[in-house]
Image (spheres, rainbow, N blue to C red):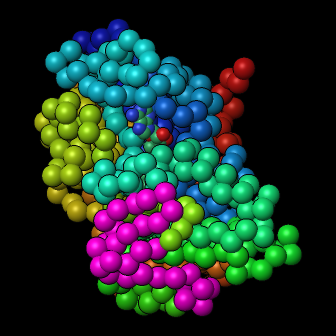
Amino acid sequence: MQPANFPATTDLVLIGGGHSHAIALKLFGMKPLPGVRLTLITDVSHAPYSGMLPGHVAGFYSFDETHIDLRRLARFSQAQFLRDRAIGLDLVNNKVICANRPPVSFDYLSIDIGSTPATNSIPGASEYAIAAKPVPQFLQAWNRVVEAVTNNPKQPISITIVGGGAGGVELALNMQARLHQVLKNARQSLDNLTIHIVHSGADLLAGHSRWVSQRLQQILFNRGIKLHLQETVTEVLPDKVICRSGLTVECDYTFWVTQASAPSWIKESGIATDSQGFILVKDTLQSVSHPHIFAAGDIATMQHYSRPKAGVFAVRQGKPLFENLQRIILGKKLKAYIPQKYYLSLIGTGDKTAIASWSFLGWESPLLWRWKDSIDRKFMQRFSNLPQMEKDD
Ligand SMILES: Cc1cc2nc3c(=O)[nH]c(=O)nc-3n(C[C@H](O)[C@H](O)[C@H](O)COP(=O)(O)OP(=O)(O)OC[C@H]3O[C@@H](n4cnc5c(N)ncnc54)[C@H](O)[C@@H]3O)c2cc1C
């Protein structure tokens, strides 16, 4: 039942079609709220699913298998679909400033725009390095690399990946798998490809167990991927990266997979952020400074819980976000969401094997890849198999 003072139309605007919003949109489609006008502002029509991205790079999955069709999902949830980029917030008048259209008014706002690897502080990085996010630009660049090797397989090629977290290591292994396949098809030597990982830490995959870190280091070594640990990149040039120690790594392409950063317009809007510019939220996923604004996924930092920026948390926040958006509109008490302390990571090693990492435990097996594959496919099916209430044009 709606309260008597329930307004005729409440504008709920979602910025970004990240993992949490994809789930919330699906739930809004299944349980619509009368009187609510839902709007999705997204700069892409197809949102990548992070869990399958490295597998897509390796060539195991197609674009469609790894991307959520947001336009279709918005239609299912009866949301207005605005293909645009949010570039600011007017928090006095409750409007989202967009790159290509007049400001969009909201009563309630939710932000799930992810993060991008920080390139700003390193000279040359934003000009010459290819960031792993935004994903569409990354995939365009990656497809050009695959095309270049396909068209000219005799030409030696060298790739540097900056960042030895799970994303960087998984990308290195999956890029190598894909390009080795291209070279094999062209009957060329696999030695034509050199991959480097440059990592500032003493160990790979900070936050994972010693076994996981060392096992991946061993796999990289076995596959001939050159690892440069405790090296901090100080400059990127078109054909090399330069490190503080004086090490210079010559390469044709540099990929950037370092620490997550937030866009500057978030902090500039006046909403409360953490020291890195991510939106600070309460346990209810509401902004600590603006309770009618919610945030989830990488762009949100939970005030009471320190957790890594990982897709698994963005996925988990989808349902509580949906529930609290409904509750605030209905004038009900919001529920606290407590993120899990330990979470399972399944890291694909490019050969249809995966390593499981959970707390201080680790395990490696092809069975884990099959398990990961089935979890990931099931997740994607939630958005491809929309229930019958959908009205496709
Ligand atoms: C190479 C790589 C591999 C990874 N693998 C894993 C993994 O296996 N498991 C895991 O848990 N995590 C993984 N991660 C981390 C994971 O990608 C992120 O934690 C996850 O995507 C965060 O989800 P999100 O919902 O916050 O945002 P995203 O999934 O990044 O979605 C944000 C969406 O908002 C859109 N958007 C951005 N800015 C705007 C704007 N201004 N206006 C409108 N729309 C906007 C974007 O286009 C995007 O569609 C990986 C990261 C990388 C780089």
Where in the figure is residue 200, as x and y percent of width and height?
A: 32, 75
Query: In the drawing, does residue 199 fall left or right of residue 133?
Result: left
Magenta residue check for 95: no
Query: In the drawing, does residue 390 fall left or right of residue 255?
Result: right
Where in the figure is residue 107, as x and y percent of width and height?
A: 28, 19
Front residue of this view, candidates 76 and 48: 48
Work out which quarter of the rendered image holds the C terminus and state it: top right
Query: In the drawing, does residue 15 fall left or right of residue 106?
Result: right
Residue at 42%, 67% (x, y): give it.
Answer: 241
Where in the figure is residue 133, as x and y percent of width and height?
A: 47, 50
Residue at 43%, 59% (x, y): give it.
Answer: 237
Q: Which residues are magenta?
A: 220-249
| Quadrant hosting residue 78 | top right
Where in the figure is residue 152, as x and y percent of width and height?
A: 78, 62
The answer to whether residue 220 of the structure is visible from this angle is: yes
Query: In the drawing, does residue 197 fall left or right of residue 274?
Result: right
Work out which quarter of the rendered image holds the N terminus and state it: top left
